[in-house]
Amino acid sequence: MLAVAMTVPAMTFAQEEEKNDTVPETKEVKNRNVMLNASSDNQPRQISIGLPSSLSAIIYEDGLPVSYNLWPCLPYLYWTGTAQHSGMGVMSLGESAIKSGTVNYAVTSKTRTGGEKFEGHANYTTNIFGLQRFDLSLAGPIANGWSYSIGAYANLDPGSNDLADIQYANDMKIFKASVSKVWNDGKGKFNLFYRYAYTKSLSDSYGPFIYVGDGSVEEYNGFSLGKDGFLPANGTITYVDVMSGEEKTITRESGTHALNNSLTANFNYTFDNGMNLDITSKYNYANAYYTMLNLAGVGTADENSGYTYASASGTHKAGDTFTGYYNSRYLLHDVGYERDWLTTAELTGKSKNHAHNWRIGANIYWNRQGIQASTGVYAHTVEADPVWLNVNGSQYSAANTGGEYYDTHETKFALYLSDDWQVTNRLWLSAGLRGEYYSVGGQSAMAYLNATDTEATYTNNVRNVGFNVADGTITKFSKNWFNPAATINGRFTISHGFGLIGEYVYAMSHPNSQDFAGAYAPILDAVNTHLGRFGLFWNTPWMQLVSQVSLISQSNYKSRTQFTNPSDASDVVTIPITYDVQTMGWTTDIVLTPFKGFTFHGLLTLQSPKYKNFAMTANFSDGTSSSYDFSDNITTGVSKTIIELDPSYVFDKFRVWASFRYQSKQYINKTNTLYFNGRWETFGGIDYNLNKNVSFSVNVINFFNQKGCDGSISAADLLEDVSAYKNYLMAGTYIRPFTVEFATHINF
């Protein structure tokens, strides 16, 4: 499972002295370096807000989400920043609540369209590990107001850690084309966009290291994190198909790929009275196949454990008894799909005196999706380029104890409105409301629990070893709810450039298709998200500063989490858990421009993110059972202190920049007894403009080659006494190693 990441960054305000006809920008957040990601080369970073982190950043393109949901079709598999984007930004929390009903920052992007003149953009990027990235965009006129744009992007990235079973850790290809028509002196515009994306994402940023016990880590047996691969050269995986119960075999490479075709139409017209009508509609066709081998912990085998070598290794032959450390992997082999018809329409305008900037909008979303997820536990040796191990003669154990299946449809019909109101020279207010009718239905392999039952109604749907849908019972379901959302924020100027700001955002949501994928029906209680913050702003000709205190909470957060039996690393159970999260924080955000050419952005967050109402019981297959209450514990994978420092300096034809991000210690387990020390993430570069058409960049990632280790200890998530975890061998994730990247940019 992903670690929970929680911060409460403030929006950066950079307004001049307000006037009656000025409406401040609140729809977008600045200074967030969207594509500067320490963990991935071509995925946007997630900007944390004080809620559990997501599987992916939420990504919008041309006014509509790239994927209807974050799962099963992860949006970063079909999107990345390319030369064919004319702009990228970050949607503010209030804007996200009104437009989508979620409280989260979302990446926004706009596809480049043609115009009256031809233009081309070409980028080439490589790095010291052999990355080959090609990016081309062409746009120009056709005739009679018609124009075109086309773009092609190819990312062939072998990665830094030289995985033995694949050629490329990331192989992404995106092709985009559009035609546009402008009429009535530019008042009307029609765009038709087509996108094709195909991605094979096979990276594996895992490795073993020694957890010293004081929050620090040390190298294990010469294994170089970020350089050595931690998967066997034999990529063949045998598993039990969750649908049929049959044993099947695939390779990791053939079982991992994602395909997307989408067609988007946009109509935009500005009327003589200044009102603007914008309608965007998209048909989206996406498939996603994942063969994920997530870490399940490091264990120790003796002569009686049943582990043997699956293939020859060193002096050992296939079938020889294995003793020593082994690493467990949790297989999630998913076959997923998504079919969407998404439409958003907005009518915007201003009052006669420009004091009001209003908007009325609607979302009409139809979605069909499904998932078939086969699971199992696997083991390999703990070394660079390891080999698979068999346990009791089989490559896998615990087959489909976390198996999932659903085939569903969802609809959303929402109306929303907002108004930005310059009340006086000193007072500005903005408010928005959203009402959403949401329905979900279909079929899954869950087992209902009736009010009087102590056991599942369909006992053959419980995820015992070897579970499969063919031997289970299909459950049909249909649910619908009303989900409201609201936001209000304002600013009062006390004196020139100085004043008070405040914001409140609320959104309600209910279970989606993925929540019905497990063994039992989900808790249907509403998820309520509240965000409130209050502070001050201070703007001068050389400084923009915002300092705010914040409180964010979310109720009934639902997930299905894997827990490992402390007595048996191969005994992994999937437990549906529900809890609340609450974070109090203080954030100061500042932008300085003290002299020509120099800009500095800084962000400091101090916070206390905690679990609330979090009690659970783990029942393992060996009959052991334990109950836990994590309420008021600090959430795992969270730092109480977050710092961002972003200086840049422009002189002559050069731009020199850097970005430093610090996060303080993070707890490894929910009992808050083990933790990782704080770390810095560092970036920097030099840009050189040869002329108006050609520029070059040299960028460095991870100046100090920090490992940035993260992860969990399989048996420790539920432990209070961790005295045994001194100089403990574990495996986890790490950030990108020291990397030098070279890029050429050509505009023509």
Image (cartoon, rainbow, N blue to C red):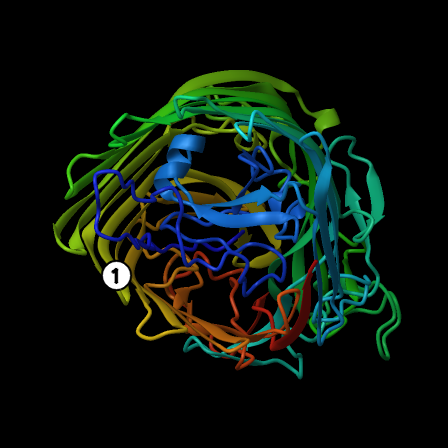
* Residue 214: % across, % down: 41, 78
Left/right of residue 350 with respect to residue 135 in the rendered view: left
**Residue 647 placement: quadrant:** bottom left
* Residue at image point 49% right, 53% down: 46
* Residue 602: % across, % down: 34, 67
Between residue 167 and residue 140, name the one nearer to us: 140
Type of amino acid at the residue the image marks with label 1: Leu
Is residue 189 depicted above or below 118 in this figure?
A: above
For label 1, the SS is strand
Left/right of residue 609 with respect to residue 170 in the rendered view: left
* Residue 635: % across, % down: 37, 55
Is residue 644 depicted above or below 21 in this figure?
A: below
**Residue 383 placement: quadrant:** bottom right
Between residue 607 and residue 121, name the one nearer to us: 121
Which residue in the structure is indicated by mark 1? 545
Disc 1 packing (10 Å; few <14; some 14–19; many ≥20): many
Q: Can residue 467 be seen from the camera position used here?
A: no
Left/right of residue 246 with respect to residue 605 in the rendered view: right
Outermost residue, left side: 494
* Residue at image point 38% right, 41% down: 27
Is residue 590 depicted above or below 426 in this figure?
A: below
- Location of the C terminus by quadrant is bottom right
